Each structure stands twice: as structure tokens, then as C-alpha cells.
Amino acid sequence: MTAMETLEATSELQSRLSSLSFSSFPGITSKQCDNTPPDRLQNTSLSEGFGQSTNPADMDETKEDSGQHSEGNEEAPAELALGEGGEENNSAGSCQLSAEMKAQMPPLSPPATWTSAALKELKAKLRTEKDSMVTVYRGDIMTVHVPTVPEAKKVCWEFATDGYDIGFGIYFDWTPVTSRSITVHISESSDDEDEEEELEGPVSNGDVEKGSKSHTNSNLAEILPVYRQDSHLSVHGGSHDFPGEGTYLLKFDNSYSLWRNKTLYYRVYYSA
């Protein structure tokens, strides 16, 4: 076979192979043509997004919208700050008013107190006097309201109990006196607190073991915190000079007792 014949045979073979590739495998050719290259997809997406964002009119509208939202967000905190400022002003005004009322009240001197071993003598005497021997039931608080009177200069008290101790404390209400009668109020501890809120404002009896706490009512002042007194072992008594016009509140507190009622002997009187 000559070189020319060999070349012709090779060309004919290549020609047949090419025709077989395009005619025998059309699916492969179509699939490759239908698929869009990933790079082309990404480029198209980016270019479309960039084209939309670079529109001057759209950019101006976006700026205006964002400016409106920004202004709205700035106005809301301003209103909130105004509300908070109003509350602070109200609170400051209330505190200032309360401070002014308290500043007008003279300071209260401590009471003079004493104890005596004459338990039997006091009990025997008070048994014969009306309303001087009472029972303070478990969980109850007995409050004796004693108004100041022009004829006297001080209030005095004495008390004792049978078998067990009792809590005792003294307060002074600066509210002007409307009645000169000595009155007694006996209630459960929760009722007593509600009554104090109605008559004199919120009063916290506190822990009888540790003494009562300060009071929020500007008209009510504490002279002697409520403490448990060993009044079953000795007579407890005392006196206090009138600080001005008002009403004494002598509290006999049995609110801490869950089971025991207390028999109380007491008397309250004025002295010049």
C-alpha cells in the first residue's frame, strides 16, 4: 500500500467516526446545549440586581423611605423620654410635698418607761375597773386611740398580762383632734393594716421580734416601736409629753401568736 492510499484510508475513517458521534448520540449533545453554565447564571443574577439598584429614581425613593423610617424611630424615643420625665417629675413632686409636711412636724422625744414587780396589786385593782381587763385573741391587734386634751400635758399607761408576753408600741397621729373620747379598736392583723390605711395611711407593723419599721404616712410618727414585752413577769408602764395636738395610738400586738389568747390588764390616763 502506497503512502497516498494510506492517507486516503485514514481520512475516510475519521470522517465515519465524526458522523457517528453527531448522529448516534443526539441526547448528549442536546443536554450540554440546554444546560446554562453556573458562571453564566451567577453573572446574569448579579448584573440584573446591579442594574436595578443603580437606577437613580429607585435610589432616591429608597433614601426617602429610609429617611422617613429614621425620623419615625427618632420621634418614638422622644415621646418615651417625655413620659418618663413626667413620671419623674410627679415622683419628685410627691417626695418634695411629703418632705415639706414632715419638716413642719417637731421631733418626738422618747417616752419615759419603767417596770414594777407589783403584778398582783395592779391586776387586783384593774379587775374592779370597767374595760380594764380584756382578752386579745390570737392573731389580733388591739389599738387604743388617746387624743390629746388641753387640760393635761402628758399621757400615761400601765399594763400586765397573765402567763405570756405581748407586743407593745406607741405612735402619734398629727391629724387634728375631732373627738376627745378614748376609743379601742380590736382587729385581726390584716384588718388592722387596712384600717390604718383608711384612717392614717399605710402602716407597717413590722416584726414584733425586731421592732416595727418606718411608716409611709406623713401624719403618723413612731414613738416606741412594737416589741414583745415580758408583761407577764412585771408591770410595764410609761409616759410621754404631748408634742402638740394629735392622737396617741397604743398598740397591744398579739398577731404573732398562732394558738394563745392573751389576758391583758391595762389603764391609760392623763397627767398634768
Image (spheres, helix red, strand yellow):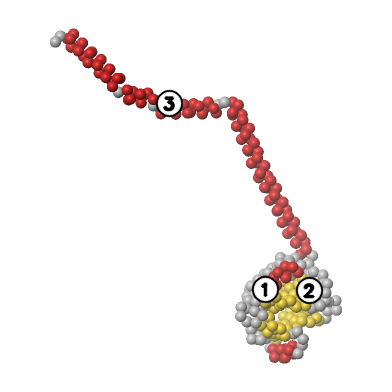
Q: CA distance from mark 2 to mark 3?
A: 95 Å
Secondary structure beneath dot 2 equals strand
Mark positioned earlier in the residue sequence (2 or 1): 1
Q: Quadrant of the C terminus?
A: bottom right
Mark positioned earlier in the residue sequence (3 or 1): 3
**Which residue is identified by label 2?**
247
Amino acid carrying label 3: it is: Arg
Q: Residues within 10 Å of mark 1 (few under 14, many from 20)?
A: some
Q: Which of the two residues, 173 or 49, is positioned nearer the viewer here?
A: 49
At horizontal 70% and vertical 69% (from top left) the residue drawn is 194
Q: Quadrant of the N terminus?
A: top left
Q: Is residue 66 above or below residue 166?
A: above
Q: CA distance from mark 3 to mark 1?
A: 85 Å
Q: Quadrant of residue 172?
A: bottom right
Q: Position of residue 167 (x, y in %)?
A: 67, 78
Q: Is residue 83 above or below residue 65?
A: below
At horizontal 79% and vertical 78% (from top left) the residue drawn is 182
**Which residue is identified by label 3?**
40
Secondary structure beneath dot 1 equals helix
Would residue 110 be seen by someone viewing this image from the given angle? no
Mark positioned earlier in the residue sequence (2 or 3): 3
Mark in the foreground, 2 or 1: 1
Amino acid carrying label 1: it is: Ser
Q: Quadrant of residue 215?
A: bottom right
Q: Which of the two residues, 189 or 221, is positioned nearer the viewer here?
A: 189
**Which residue is identified by label 1?**
189
Mark in the foreground, 2 or 3: 3
Q: Is residue 153 above or below residue 116?
A: above
Amino acid carrying label 2: it is: Thr
Q: Residue furthest left?
A: 1
